[in-house]
Amino acid sequence: MEELSLEYIQELIKESKGQELVSYYWENDIHPADWAYYLEDLSYEELAKFIELIGPETGLPIFEFVSFERKRRVLENLSGSNLAKLITFMNPDDRADLVEDVDEEMQEYILSLLFQSERQNVLRLISYPDNSAGAYMTTDYALLHANDSVQDALEQIRLQAPKREIVYYIYVVDSAMHLVGFISLRRLIMAPRRVLIKEIMDKTVISVQVDEDIESVAQKMRHYDFLAIPVVDQNNRMVGLITFDDIYDVIQEEATEDMYLLANLDRDENIESPLYRSVKLRIPWLLINLCTALLVVFTVNLFKDSISQYVALAAVMPIVGLIGGNAGNQSLTVVVRALALGEIKLSEHWSVLVKEVGVGLSNGILIGGVMAFITFFWYNNPWLACIIWIAMTVNLIIAGLFGSMIPILLRKLKLDPALGSSIFVTTATDVGGFFVFLGLSTLFLQQLLAVI
């Protein structure tokens, strides 16, 4: 990777030497993503002027790799004419995403700079629900008609290609825009010139509804290994196209969201969030966790007399909760991932519950047996060893049951299966494990004390 001279770039920007800056841009054969990385140290004003000097069309690929906050501030520093050109050159879906995320004043200003057709297209795209296929689709796609000849189709694609996001697949519609087939660019190039498109197109078209959940769309694209998938309305009229790069963003967003929810964090927080915002976003979950922790304290407090009479219970008791919590999170992670990838049908949830309970029973017997041996070695008390063995076995069964049941239940309620799951699973294993361990210890307290 070549090294750019930021000082030289800043000097050219300061002196408004557009030709020299354009020459420097083309002389350095560097990917736009790397340009965006090197230009991170420029001020918002400098970056805006850089784009104006090299031209919005040339600067757009760099602009697309800039973080959203910098994009917003750069837009504020662009002249009206250059802003209009930059927005016009953007793909419809990227343009809609940007317009949707800026504040209302900037949104109205950007829309006022667009032609009426482009403005209506943006307003239509941002009107779809956030997690629907319509919110992620682009309206730039290659299109042919069934009665076109291959010769005519090739000429049309040659004209369409510069303005289309991808031309790997070309979609075929009738006069009313109903999706009737598709053809790959490779097949089109290799076909005889006088053949009609309807004779060589693939009529088995897999599409998604415009209001379909984007996670479902991602699962279909992964299942069929598509680079793009068409979007249709209720009447099977083609309205857009979702490409792999959009789905990659969805996968990244969903993975981040599940990670945050499993850790009981708000997905709007990131490493750059101000201190007050991080505190504000974390406090609610910590308060919920505090309430569940009080439930655990209440459970332990029920057996305070037993603990005071045999202090060894307090020493080994945390192991029951810790192992149970870890086992519960293992089940939870496996089930949440399977639900996210569509590997579990809700109609088959009983098999998942039985399997995870079986895993908990098996691990409980094995891990509990190891802990029983260690406990006997430490305290030379067979009763305590047996009690902790039973308690750990029961608690790992609880861990498997709740670790699989809670996310499945949340999905049935149309909620994210990762939402607060770790708090509920940990509470279940702590309360359940401590109740079984201390309950058995209280029941056999005389036998425990007799060995001392």
Image: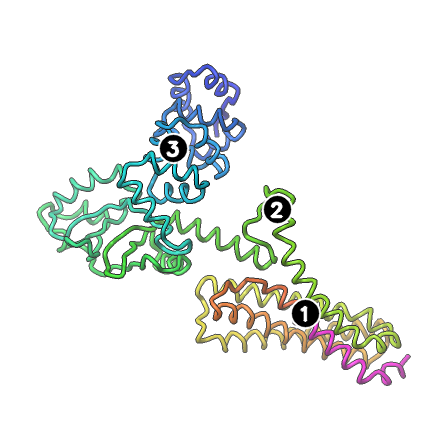
Residue 277 is tagged as 2
Q: Residue 361 got which mark?
A: none
Mark nearest the camera among 1 and 2 is: 2
Residues in magenta, as a range:
431-452
**284 left or right, relative to 202:** right
> Up-down: is 118 above or below 209?
above
Dividing the image into 4 quarters, which one contains the C terminus?
bottom right
Residue shown at 39%/39% (left/top)? 108
Query: x and y percent of residue 387 in the render?
Result: 77, 79
Distance between mark 1 and mark 2 Cα atoms: 33 Å
The residue positioned 56% from the left and 56% from the top of the image is 259
Residue placed most toward the observer, 301 or 147: 301
Mark 1 packing: few (<14 Cα in 10 Å), some, or many (20+)? many
Which secondary structure dominates the residues rendered in magenta? helix
Q: Position of residue 208 (x, y in %)?
A: 31, 59
| Alpha carbon distance from label 1 to label 3 | 53 Å
Between marks 2 and 3, how big is the CA–CA gap?
A: 32 Å
**Which amino acid, mark 3?**
Leu
In front here: 370 or 16? Answer: 16
Give SS at disc 3. Answer: helix
Q: Quick check: 87 above or below 428?
A: above
Q: Residue at x 20, y 56 (%)?
A: 178
Between discs 1 and 3, the one toward the N terminus: 3
Amino acid on which the number 2 mark rests in the picture: Arg
258 left or right of 329?
A: left
Residue that numbered label 3 is attached to: 60
Q: Which residue is mark 1?
A: 324
Q: Element type at marker 2?
A: helix
* Residue that lies at the very extreme toward the left in this rendered image: 194
Dot 1 amino acid type: Gly
